[in-house]
Image (cartoon, rainbow, N blue to C red):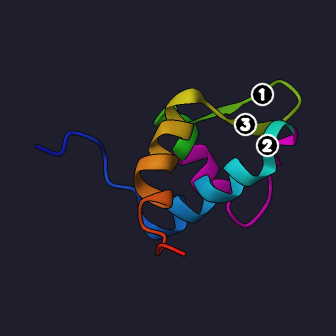
Amino acid sequence: MWNEPYLETCCRSALHRLELSGALGRPDGLKDGPCLHRLAGMRLAAHQADGRFRITPEGEARHEREVLRSRPAA
């Protein structure tokens, strides 16, 4: 049974960009800001004291399951 909240396409994209940003993270105030705040509310991202969002271990696991899983094999 699926027991995780659904991630809208825009939020999956924001999660992917967050993963790609690595330790640098993503600043608040960008177009994907609402999604980053939503991801933080789901504990998939953390809004740090420096104002940047960084992916959490839970976010990395969700990224692997939902984003990387959907990529076609090379």
Q: Position of residue 5 (x, y in %)?
A: 31, 46
Q: Nearer the viewer, mark 1 or mark 3?
A: 3
Residue under the point 72% across and 36% down: 54
- What residue is shown with label 1? 48
Boundaries of the magenta span? 24-38
Residue under the point 51% across and 60% down: 12
- Horizontally, residue 61 falls left or right of residue 27, namely left
Q: Nearer the viewer, mark 1 or mark 2?
A: 2
Upstream in sequence: badge 3 or badge 2: 2
- What residue is shown with label 2? 22
Measured Cα–Cα span from mark 1 to mark 3: 7 Å
- What residue is shown with label 3? 54
Badge 1: how crowded within 10 Å, few (<14), some, or many (20+)?
few
Compared with 11, 26 (above or below) is above
- Horizontally, residue 16 falls left or right of residue 48, namely left
Of 64 and 24, the residue lying toward us = 64
Kindly identify which numbered label has been placed on residue 26: none
